[in-house]
Image (tube, coloured by chain):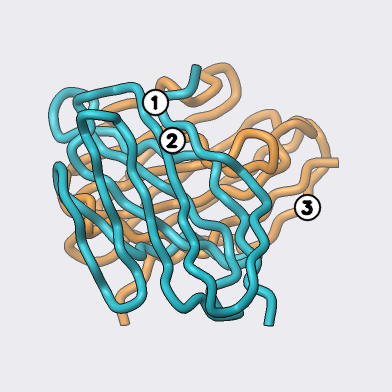
Chain colours: A cyan, B orange
Amino acid sequence: QKEVEQDPGPLSVPEGAIVSLNCTYSNSAFQYFMWYRQYSRKGPELLMYTYSSGNKEDGRFTAQVDKSSKYISLFIRDSQPSDSATYLCAMMLIQGAQKLVFGQGTRLTINP
Amino acid sequence: DARVTQTPRHKVTEMGQEVTMRCQPILGHNTVFWYRQTMMQGLELLAYFRNRAPLDDSGMPKDRFSAEMPDATLATLKIQPSEPRDSAVYFCASGIGVQGNTIYFGEGSWLTVV
């Protein structure tokens, strides 16, 4: 079983829809939770990060962390065709191994 | 505009040849990661360094892969001998300590082994 599970999709929604992307994890020691966006043939770019539990909002993006359920989410409001990309969740330990572990990535397409 | 720089961007090589990929982390970053990305496996952590010391390379096939940081401005990933199954995109990322919000990726080295 992978430490971080993410549905690879693909996910296709109409422009303007609310998008919900999710990951589950097994290691309760993860403390940093990130979402990266990756366009085709590009490197992942940091989109959102959260330390420990709670919500964080940045424009049309909201990241949520529920440590009791070992579940994180990314919501995109008023989705745009330019949001079409692969979204990767990532988690990091700050003790011990301190490694950064990624989910499989969800391929998202926003249709005009 | 600070960025992680990777070379080469693209490499096609024959099976059995040595491949060296290079990464220049962002100035001031003391943590460097090497990842491999494939359609099937996604992003796999190969190795990472802090202050040039290897912290974990358990994800790296030891018989053919090696990773080093000769100095703070250069990280290298070497494959010898290369095999077709090594064909993938190799990403380098750098950050500051354990601060997850400081980790940035390069554009990747696209490797094809024929």
Which chain hosts label 1?
B
* Mark 3 or mark 2: whose residue is earlier in sequence: 3
**Label drawn at residue B57:** 1
Name the amino acid, label 3. Val
Report the side of A111 relative to B16 (left or right).
Answer: left
Q: Earlier in the sequence, mark 1 or mark 2?
A: 1
B93 w.r.t. B27: above or below: above
Circle 3/circle 2 CB separation < 8 Å: no
Q: Nearer the viewer, mark 3 or mark 1?
A: 1
In the image, taking residue B71 as reference, residue A16 lies left or right, namely right
Which image quarter holds the N terminus of chain B?
bottom left
Residue at point 39% right, 61% down?
A: A75
Residue under pointer 3: B12
- Asked if marks 3 and 1 touch (Cβ < 8 Å), the reply is no
Residue B64 position, x and y percent, is 60, 24
User: Which amino acid type is shown beneath numbered disc 2?
Assistant: Ala
- Which residue sits at x=81%, y=34%? B15
Q: Secondary structure at mark 1?
A: loop
Q: Amino acid at mark 1?
A: Asp
Secondary structure, mark 2, is strand
